[in-house]
Image (cartoon, rainbow, N blue to C red):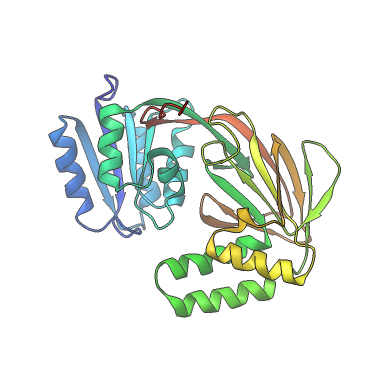
């Protein structure tokens, strides 16, 4: 266990994804077994921001968060680069940030691994309109498919169909304009930005974002891209082009739909996305050695 981890604040949203009402007691038992002084706050989601603020204000060595992607991002933003370490544990439906850091493991295993073998690690990410993302952001019409995909993941097929139908009616109605690193303007259905933590083409030490331009040429490609957005495989689509990027500007005719680390948001009609080399510090297991 890292010597610097003596006090922990853990916030659990029992109404989120895969957390459940027993999780706070299970967390207390695990932390007690490891001999760590900790305060565990249980939230039903209505006061989650207040719980996070209390946790950070207590100035612990580590803030552990057992909740969804949006709460994990809020914790990262509150702790910042100079605050406590963060351990975002998988408690939501997509768990983009926890899986990128700890792998696809249950939250208790992720917490134990972080505390037994973890080390402080500075992570970079993207910023847009004062919001941070540590895994990925997608701006443009395909972001409208996120609520439908989440409903499908929950098994609510009626809601998935309704939201998918609404997304299809609005998708591909108007392209956005973009400029990457001050280059020429282009048009696309959407542009996504993948952080090094999750990118398959960038190393973890890269100081850029992976920019993916989604640009179907016709209705058939648009339908295929919409289907791939629904199933989560859109980055493999041949209508997607990628390139490294540190700063981008994007414009739309109205507010831009977006998804930041799995959470749908609505942005202004003109935004700037930029790389931040040090958003926060997480407690993460050491990287696996490269295969020679």
180 to 71, vertically: above or below: above
Most distant residue in the front direction: 292
Residue 118 location in percent, x, y? 33, 28
Judge left or right: residue 173 versus residue 289: right
The answer to whether one can see residue 171 in this image is: no
Judge left or right: residue 147 versus residue 79: right
Residue shown at the point (13%, 35%) measured from the top left = 33
Quarter of the image for the N terminus: give it: top left
Quick one: 222 or 251, which is closer to the camera? 222
* Residue 285 found in image quarter: top left
Judge left or right: residue 110 versus residue 219: left
Most distant residue in the right direction: 184
Residue 237 location in percent, x, y? 65, 57
Most distant residue in the top direction: 3
Residue shown at the point (28%, 25%) measured from the top left = 5
What is the tally of numbered marks visible in this picture?
A: 0
Quick one: 212 or 14, which is closer to the camera? 212
Residue shown at the point (53%, 31%) measured from the top left = 204
Quick one: 269 or 160, which is closer to the camera? 160
The answer to whether one can see residue 86 in this image is: yes
Residue 159 location in percent, x, y? 48, 76
100 to 91, vertically: above or below: above
4 to 243, vertically: above or below: above
224 to 179, vertically: above or below: below
Residue shown at the point (45%, 42%) measured from the top left = 100
Residue 51 location in percent, x, y? 34, 46
């Amino acid at each position: 266990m890292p010597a610097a981890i003596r006090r922990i604040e853990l916030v659990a949203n029992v109404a989120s994804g895969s957390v459940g009402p027993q999780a706070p007691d299970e967390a207390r038992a695990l932390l007690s077994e490891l001999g760590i002084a900790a305060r565990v706050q249980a939230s039903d989601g209505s006061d989650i921001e207040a719980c996070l603020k209390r946790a950070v204000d207590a100035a612990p060595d580590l803030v552990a968060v057992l909740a969804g992607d949006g709460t994990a991002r809020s914790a990262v933003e509150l702790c910042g680069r100079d605050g406590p370490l963060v351990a975002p544990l998988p408690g939501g439906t997509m768990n983009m940030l926890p899986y990128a850091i700890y792998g696809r493991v249950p939250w208790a295993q992720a917490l134990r691994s972080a505390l037994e073998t973890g080390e402080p690690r500075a992570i970079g990410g993207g910023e847009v309109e004062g919001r941070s993302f540590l895994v990925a952001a997608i701006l443009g019409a395909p972001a409208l498919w996120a609520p439908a995909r989440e409903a499908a993941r929950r098994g609510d097929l009626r809601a998935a169909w309704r939201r998918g139908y609404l997304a299809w009616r609005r998708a591909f109605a108007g392209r956005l304009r973009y400029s990457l690193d001050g280059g020429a303007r282009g048009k696309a259905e959407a542009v996504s930005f993948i952080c090094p933590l999750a990118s398959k083409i960038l190393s973890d030490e890269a100081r850029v974002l992976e920019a993916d331009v989604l640009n179907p040429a016709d209705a058939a490609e648009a339908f295929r891209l919409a289907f791939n957005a629904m199933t989560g495989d859109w980055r493999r689509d041949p209508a997607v082009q990628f390139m490294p990027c540190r700063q981008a500007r994007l414009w739309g005719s109205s507010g831009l739909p977006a998804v930041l680390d799995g959470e749908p948001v609505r942005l202004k009609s003109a935004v700037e996305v930029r790389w931040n080399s040090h958003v926060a510090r997480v407690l993460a297991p050491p990287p696996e050695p490269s295969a020679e």
